[in-house]
Image (cartoon, rainbow, N blue to C red):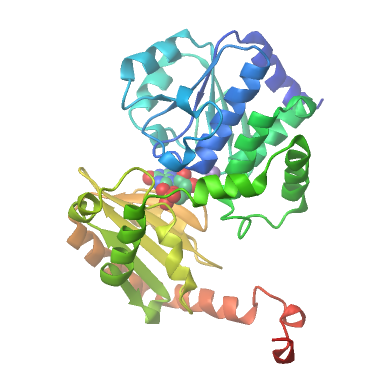
């Protein structure tokens, strides 16, 4: 074992009660990573709990032990007690304490030992031990590397493996991005050997939406999408009324922001959602354009180069206007990013099917 992982193993060994915490609006990687650790610790007969600041989507409720997740917005007292009782807190899938919102002051004041496992750039979390790697496909991949690092890869059971697989699958958009490193597939190969049924997990996550969600998507694409071809940009927006008209539940808008990428020439896509206290932005890009930089500068946010989030504290209308007014100053950057995508096609020319093959 390397000294780095030896230190982690010692922190675990010294703990008798472990709390695992992931970020606000937890996605497949947040839930998969946190529940992977929970399932692993339970399989080792350790005392552990998994906490998230806000509710998780219904399409992740089948994950092993998901029903034991403690949701702070629903049960603040239980969560505070859990943190009180813990002597080690493992933070997963976020790079700044702001991502756990109202839990941040509680964790900061707790004085507990902290570990961080994450793949976002610029980690800024006051942890005693940090496993941070932006080249990892997902935090779930890092959970596997963590267990491997402490010599426990051979003890990963099926429920833990299913959680890890779900995190990798969702954060790579079904292996369509962030997944070009052979190591990711070596890990997946091991998960399959443990018995993960990848097709069943795909169906559980992606074939499990409500009919309302599909209708909401139709509404967004027809009436709430603006395409700005001169900036290689498209944006979508949803009002509070849209959400209530279509009986929106947590997770229904997951994936919407990626849809404009199927339009030729689009490399920058943003989804604006009107929340009660602010406008939530989801930003995605391709190629040389960093949405992390863009949202850090203009929308109090952050994330990855190609996937980030942010907030706007003005009306939806003003937020959209502000966004449009920013685009001319990025015109050159967006054009250059598009040019380099066109010049370096994702599929090498020699691999493209010949017209006669079709
Ligand atoms: P999403 O658009 O799916 O909410 O988030 C995309 C990515 O950006 C995720 O990796 C998420 O953790 C990160 N992210 C989302 N919102 C914020 C935010 O307000 N601040 C920061 N720093 N990261 C965010
Ligand atoms: Mn992630």
> Is the residue 275 above or below the residue 41 in the image?
below
| Residue located farthest toward the bottom when viewing the structure as drawn | 356
Q: Residue 46's spot in the image, x, y percent? A: 62, 12
Residue at coordinates 20% horizontally, 53% vertically from top-left? 245
Position of residue 223 in the picture relative to residue 154 (left or right): left
Q: Residue 354's spot in the image, x, y percent? A: 73, 88
Residue at coordinates 52% horizontally, 77% vertically from top-left? 338
Q: In the figure, residue 64 lies in which quadrant?
A: top right
> Is the residue 241 above or below the residue 12 in the image?
below
Q: In the figure, residue 36 lies in which quadrant?
A: top right
Q: Residue 209's spot in the image, x, y percent? A: 42, 50
Q: Nearer the viewer, residue 56 or 130?
A: 56
Residue at coordinates 71% horizontally, 27% vertically from top-left? 157
Q: In the figure, residue 153 lies in which quadrant?
A: top right
Q: Is residue 235 in view? A: yes
Q: Nearer the viewer, residue 185 or 313?
A: 185
Q: Is residue 121 in view? A: no
Could you tell me which quadrant the N terminus lies in? top right
Q: Residue 129's spot in the image, x, y percent? A: 62, 25
Could you tell me which quadrant the C terminus lies in? bottom right
Residue at coordinates 65% horizontally, 16% vertically from top-left? 12
> Is the residue 292 above or below the residue 108 in the image?
below
Q: Nearer the viewer, residue 308 or 44?
A: 44
| Residue located farthest toward the right when viewing the structure as drawn | 1
């Amino acid at each position: 074992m390397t000294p780095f992982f030896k230190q982690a193993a010692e922190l675990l060994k010294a703990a008798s009660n472990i709390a695992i915490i992931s970020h606000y609006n937890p996605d497949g990687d947040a839930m998969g990573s946190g529940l992977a650790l929970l399932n692993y610790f339970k399989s080792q007969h350790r005392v552990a709990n998994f906490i998230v600041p806000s509710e998780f989507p219904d399409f992740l409720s089948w994950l092993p032990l998901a029903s034991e997740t403690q949701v702070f917005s629903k049960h603040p007292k239980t969560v505070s007690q859990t943190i009180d009782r813990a002597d080690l807190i493992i933070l997963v899938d976020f790079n700044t304490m702001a991502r756990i919102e109202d839990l941040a002051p509680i964790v900061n004041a707790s004085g507990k030992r902290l570990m961080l496992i994450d793949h976002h750039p610029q980690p800024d979390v006051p942890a005693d031990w940090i496993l941070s790697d932006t080249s990892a496909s997902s935090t779930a991949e890092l959970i596997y590397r963590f267990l491997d690092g402490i010599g426990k890869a051979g003890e990963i059971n099926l429920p833990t493996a299913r959680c890890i697989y779900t995190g990798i699958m969702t954060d790579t958009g079904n292996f369509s991005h962030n997944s070009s490193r052979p190591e990711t597939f070596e890990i997946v190969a091991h998960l399959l050997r443990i018995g993960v049924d990848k097709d069943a997990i795909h169906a559980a996550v992606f074939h499990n939406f409500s009919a309302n969600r599909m209708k909401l998507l139709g509404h967004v694409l027809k009436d709430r999408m603006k395409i700005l071809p001169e900036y290689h940009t498209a944006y979508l927006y949803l009002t509070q009324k849209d959400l209530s008209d279509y009986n929106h539940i947590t997770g229904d808008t997951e994936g919407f922001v990626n849809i404009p990428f199927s339009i030729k020439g689009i490399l920058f896509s943003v989804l604006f959602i009107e929340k009660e206290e602010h406008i939530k932005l989801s930003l995605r890009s391709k190629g040389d354009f960093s949405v992390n930089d863009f949202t850090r500068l203009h929308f109090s946010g952050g994330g990855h180069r190609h996937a980030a989030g942010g907030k706007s504290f003005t009306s939806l209308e003003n937020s959209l206007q502000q966004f449009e007014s920013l685009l001319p100053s990025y015109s050159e950057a967006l054009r250059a990013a598009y040019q380099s995508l066109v010049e370096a096609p994702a599929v090498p020319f020699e691999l493209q099917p010949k017209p006669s093959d079709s």
